[in-house]
Amino acid sequence: MERDPYEVLGVSRGAADDEIKKAYRALAKKYHPDNYTDANQRARAEEKMKEINAAYEQIQKGDTGYSSGGSGYGSYEGPRQGGVGVYATIRQYINARMPDQAEQLLNGIAQEERGAEWFYLRACVYVLRGWIYEAHTSAGTACSLDPDNEEYRQLYDTIEANINRADGTYRTTSDSSECDICSICQTLACLNCMCRMCCR
Amino acid sequence: MFGYVKPFTPELRVRENELYNAVYCGLCVSMGRKTRWFSRFTLSYDAVFLALVLASLSGERFVIKPGRCAFAPFRKKPVAEECEILRFAAAVSARLTYYSVLDGIRDEKGVKRLIRRAALPFCRHMERAAEKIAPFDGEYIGSCLDKLHAAEDENSPELDLCAGYFGDVLAYCFGEGAPEGKKESAALIGGLVGRFIYAADACDDLEKDEKSGSYNPLRFGEGDRADKLRAAYGAMCVWADRAAAELLLEGSVSPESDVADNIMRLGMPDTARRVSSDRAKERTENGKRSV
């Protein structure tokens, strides 16, 4: 799950380069896998090191535009500007990360006027709050009301990708015999990597 | 409380399993000593998880010694010695049991309600004893549960909202027990696990609540049943993963944290799969297997 890189290193968002470097070195020293003899602890230390390295790299690159609020929808950028009337204002609120104001306007829209866009924008509000269940069901409703809309589909897929990431990483052995769409994708990805080894 | 926060034993090492069982037994003994003997019957996996998380965060290790127990008198078993963490976990368990019994009296009907009424004086004793060990503010827990009841009375379709109130209760308890500087992480883990427990319970009881007409957030709102179960499953996995990441980031590397890690990374997703799978289908599959 994507986390705020500053949080990973334990420094504030406005920290100076020196401070970040110092925090990174201290953590790297502490969690160097060579410090641990036990295989399990070593694996955990390695995982932690990976996270620290990724966070440090991300800060160095200046690529820290993650979405906050503990929701972990790192790659989702929010709705596009546009829409008509009240929906345009709601979109602005959502892009300004003001879920309460957006929700207030959404609730003001009459029940019978609530279409796919309404459900989509409500899903965006829930994403901002980190409410995964509600975001998933609202985005699902938006997609079923308007299956051809790319914007709605994109949000739904992002939520699904987050769930699969949380769930797929630690899939237990009992499921390994199942041939689902994920395992097909994984196989294709592996084959693709192997192709790159020889066909440069 | 409900037994949803369990380790995934096939992936536990033998010594980790021994540690888990020792903490389980140790907690039971501590409960008997500190929060009256009858509180031992209310021992839950959740309180064991609390003890493991607090031990992981504080870096303390449980001291394990062979001991006997009234429930298994003939064979010595490894038991974690009483310590501050176990006393705190015992006290939290007793206090939350008291609140859940009060809840039951409010919600249940018939025989179940009578049983809870009969248990209430015992629970009140437990609560009083526990208050001396974990003297945190009962009013805050009460206010969270009141908000939860208000949302339930309104037939709120928002699982995240209800689960969030329940999460607040555990977040508060976890935060109170953690050492200085780790309170925030403990509260975050507690909050996520609390949400998980509420959502798992809602999924698990869905079929029963549909028949009896009782409140369940999954019964309300738009979307069909399978979609909602899938969404709830996804939310549970994300919460468990986030909680595991938080403990990992706190950087404690000990056998206690390995077990807590197993619970969050494997045990909880396993529970999520179990409670959110289509019951009817699962039953027929099991039937086929037994034939």
Image (cartoon, rainbow, N blue to C red):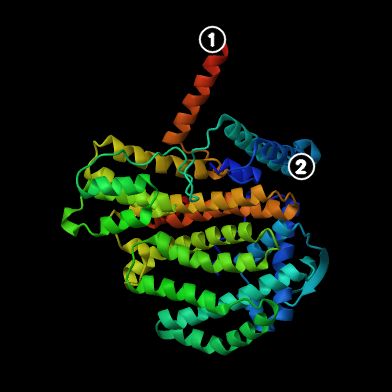
- Classify B32 as above or below A109: below
Residue in view at x 42 percent, y 73 percent: B147
Residue B63 location (% of width, % of height): 81, 63
Label 1: which secondary element: loop
Q: Chain of mark 2?
A: A
Residue B198 location (% of width, % of height): 47, 64
Amino acid type shown at disc 1: Arg
Amino acid type shown at disc 2: Lys
B83 or A40, nearer to the observer: B83
A126 or B180, nearer to the observer: B180
Residues at marks 2 and 1 touching, judged by CB atoms closer than 8 Å: no
Outermost residue toward the left?
A112
Residue B26 location (% of width, % of height): 74, 69
Q: Which tag, 2 or 1, sits closer to the chain's start?
A: 2
Residue in view at x 38 percent, y 39 percent: A157
Query: Mark 1 highlights which residue?
Result: A200
Residue in view at x 61 percent, y 59 percent: B184
B116 or A23, nearer to the observer: A23
Query: Mark 2 highlights which residue?
Result: A30
